[in-house]
Image: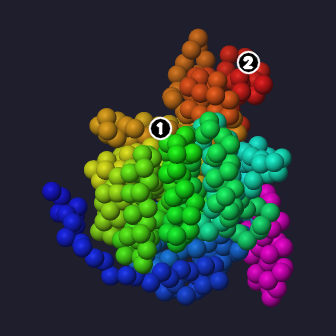
Amino acid sequence: MDKALDIRHLRTVEPRAFKVFTHHQLDQIEQLGGLPEEIRFDMRVVANVLPFRVNEYVIEELIDWTRVPDDPIFQLVFPQREMLEPEAFSRMATLLRGEPSRAEIKALATELRGDLNPHPAGQMELNVPALDDEAVDGLQHKYRETVLFFPSQGQVCHSYCTFCFRWAQFVGDKDLRFALGEADTLHRYLREHPEVSDLLVTGGDPMVMKTHHLEGYLSALTAPEFDHIQTIRIGTKSLTFWPYRFVSDADSDQLLRLLEKLVRAGKHVALMAHYNHWRELETPIAREAIRRVRDTGAVIRSQGPLLRHINDNADDWARMWRTQVRLGIVPYYMFVERDTGARRYFEVPLVRAWEIYRGAMQQLSGLGRTARGPSMSANPGKVEIQGVTEIHGEKLFVLRMIQGRNPDWVQRPFFARYDEQATWLDQLTPAFGEEKFFFEE
């Protein structure tokens, strides 16, 4: 056995304090002292608009400080100047160079955030369901079989990813935030919708919650009235940002017993683990956390977006997916960076995304080719880029609807005109002279 994987002797891991830094504490991170003051000021400017949060585990274990600022994990969690449009950056920088009040900073930040598309793909307008003709703000029901649930206690993360498409959850604006604190409302909605087979608990990160809160939402689903709920998915970055959650936190064993209970009740339990780089899988504590989760009978599936500055090359994806397969994780999705937040810094052209995906797949065996992508979670549904081809002299993108608001769209292939610059679905135009894509009707 690979010596790096042979950690079953790890019976106990010493509890570790969870210390986190926010943008008010950027100057307290010792390693940043080696960076020029100009760069540190740039970080403060951006962190007053986009959310910033990082913990000591990420700082000490995952970032290679000899490579900063180019280190991929540093780019993953620390704000960079180019994440804001030049005019937006200049306005906030000018304000901060004076002596602004907190209210003045908040007012400008709120204005600038309004230009960053805080809720893409119709999340607020089209996805929120109703009970008794009233919107249920902590649920989204975009696809027939799947309900997304945002528990109010899980709407932060152990650290924040700079690319996050749910950044609006973390900036303290109640008008931008999804959250539901009542288990009864969740359970009632699921009882009234027998067509739902999958519950996705998301955030933020549900794994920031104490286990007893999670139990309050999930234990009831083992009752016969919820037999139609076949799969319970939990979206989390904790296997990267705080693997102690599954190993040595005070209620980590209680959490694992909850997963076991759900599995024994016949549910398919899947941790939808967010991974962006192979280095996130390399620490002994991260691998111990993976082992302990898998021992419960839960499945770990990996997903994450393709990001400029972090993982925009085929070799990194191939290495990450190979390592995941070796550790028992199922590669699930490569996403295209969403059209929100700091997309201008991270996005790559769709043709380049497909080339990177294809280049990674060419390095894998069949077990690693379970990852679908590159996939855009767009307004009509999940759209996969299947390739580039030429038909009757016209160069085209070949696309497929993996999932759709309308179930009749699922698995339907379609074509778009080739565009070297396009980075999102709404920048593509139909092929063969068609005026609209089929889903635009």
State the separation of the CA atoms marked 2 and 1: 27 Å
Image point 19% across, 70% down: which residue? Answer: 9
Say which of 26 and 87 sits in front: 26
Which of the 4 image quadrants contains residue 36? bottom right
* Residue 96 falls inside the magenta stretch: yes
Q: Which mark is residue 372?
A: 1
Q: Which residue is mark 2?
A: 434
At mark 1, the secondary structure is strand
Q: Which residues are magenta?
A: 89-116
Q: Residue at x 55, y 56 (%)?
A: 220
Q: Does residue 283 appear left or right of residue 28 in this picture? A: left
- Mark 1: which amino acid? Arg
Res 379 seen here = yes
Give the mark nearest the N terminus, 2 or 1.
1
**Residue 96 x/y as whole percent:** 76, 81
310 sits left or right of 50 in the view: left
Q: Which residue is rendered at x = 68% and y = 64% of the image?
A: 181
Q: Residue at x 51, y 28 (%)?
A: 387
Q: Amino acid at mark 2?
A: Glu
Residue at the front extreme of this rendering: 224
Quadrant that contains the N terminus: bottom left
The percent position of residue 417, horizontal first and vertical second, equals 65, 25
Residue 155 vs residue 44, the one in the foreground:
155
Q: Is residue 375 magenta?
A: no
Answer whether labels 2 and 1 touch (C-beta < 8 Å): no
- Extreme-top residue of the structure: 392
Residue 246 quadrant: bottom left
